[in-house]
Amino acid sequence: MVRWKKIRLAVALVAVAVLATLAWTRFNTKRSAVANDTVTLAQLRGADAAAVARGAYVMRTGDCMACHSAGQGEFAGGYNIDTPFGRIVSSNITPDPETGIGGMTEREFFNAVRHGQGSKGLLYPAMPYTAYQRLTDQDMHDLWAYMSTVAPVHNEIEETAGLGFPFNIRLVMAGWNLLFFDNRPFTPTPGLSIEQTRGQYLVDGGTHCAACHSPRNLLGAESGKGYMQGGNLGLWYAPDLTPNPHTGLGGASEDSVVEYLRTGSNGVAVATGPMAEAVEHSFQHLEESDIRSIARYLQTLPASPGTRPKAIAQDTPAMQRGALRYEVNCSACHGVRGEGMGGMTAAFAGNRSLQSDDATSLMHVMLVGGRAAATEAKPTGAGMPSFAWKMSDRQIAETLDYIRNSWGNAAKPVDEAEVARLRSVLSARDQLPAN
């Protein structure tokens, strides 16, 4: 009996040691010691102009403005982020000392951005500190300098108002971080060129592409096995960015990827939804060399395992109904042969992002409409109307099946029940009665 007690004690001590070591690696903020811990953001004056300019660029790579601006002023917060666990409202990150981050020191700013430890407690990974932890000290210093030039806005935000119990308790994130937060600086993949390494730094760090384009597990953490193989965001689907020739970028030229990121369209695909926001607020402001480094890094990834399914036969009654409905409702903008309208509206022929197994984004725009990115290079962001009032769930599914299986495309059938579910979640209107 004494022997077993000693064994259990030894096991417990080992478990405690392992947990303590894990906690140290996950919550250690030693890297932030390079930052000043006395001057608050509201007190900071006379930041170096070159540092401010570099920090503005870091802000653009991180797409901070898109998520922290919602009508009350730039960076004043209030943007709604819907998650499977409820709605999170983005915080006020202006230098206002009462409702923003004006009371933070640089070190506290580092802790929040790179380690998810904010002034109100642990942050939720809807703020992608899981990617920003890869930002270099220099980029962080420069970002801090830039934030000191932002106009303070007094705007009280309750970030957790849309979260139910227990997710509205920030301490819950301690367990999540223990399980999933990789609290390490950027480590480039061996064998990459200097340009590809820069692309990896941008993709895995500031632009946090994997946050949308990688699948997540039931607890909302990125799945390492599906890195860049596409991810469902609940109301949108971010497509495969690996060199998969059917659903990914395998058939896309480097120039077409660069054009898409810089302008929002490349003659085939057109950015809409969250990607339109990313293009407008982030990618169009980046140097072409950085955009090209991203494209070249993505080419180095292993292709996802997805394969081309057998296309749905064109002579089935459902496909024939879909063809007629497409001609009446869609062909004026997207072309009778799915050729699109000169990059202003998406082409369907050869558009691999349409052929993913997950058709959430397509159902989304059919139900509530959408708007293409509007950029300096291509300022006319075309709008797409809602067809919820005009088509039933079955009719939307049939129309999308036709689009996804014509002009050389091939994709699995769209589930009518999924259309109905998304119609309900989006509060899209019902089809009008026939008479």
Image: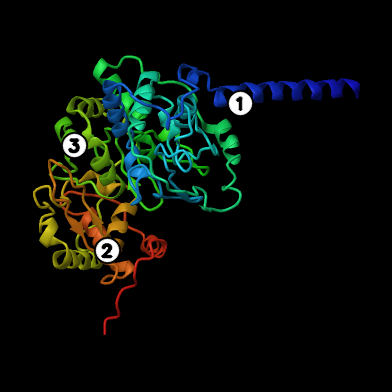
Which residue is under mark 3? 262
Q: Quadrant of the N terminus?
A: top right
* Secondary structure category for the residue under label 1: helix
Tag 3–tag 1 contact (CB < 8 Å): no
Residue 343: x and y in percent read: 12, 47
* Residue 306 visible in image: no
Which residue is under mark 1? 23
Specify the amino acid type for callout 2: Glu
Q: Which residue sits at x=38%, y=22%?
A: 141
Mark 3 or mark 2, which is nearer to you? 3
Q: Which of pointers 2 and 1 lies earlier in the amino acid sequence?
A: 1
Q: Which mark is residue 398?
A: 2
Specify the amino acid type for callout 3: Arg
Q: Which mark is residue 246?
A: none
Q: How far is disc 3 from disc 1 in space, using C-alphas?
A: 40 Å
* Secondary structure category for the residue under label 3: helix
Q: Which residue sits at x=49%, y=28%?
A: 108
Q: How far is disc 2 from disc 1 in space, using C-alphas?
A: 51 Å
Specify the amino acid type for callout 1: Ala
Residue 254: x and y in percent read: 17, 30
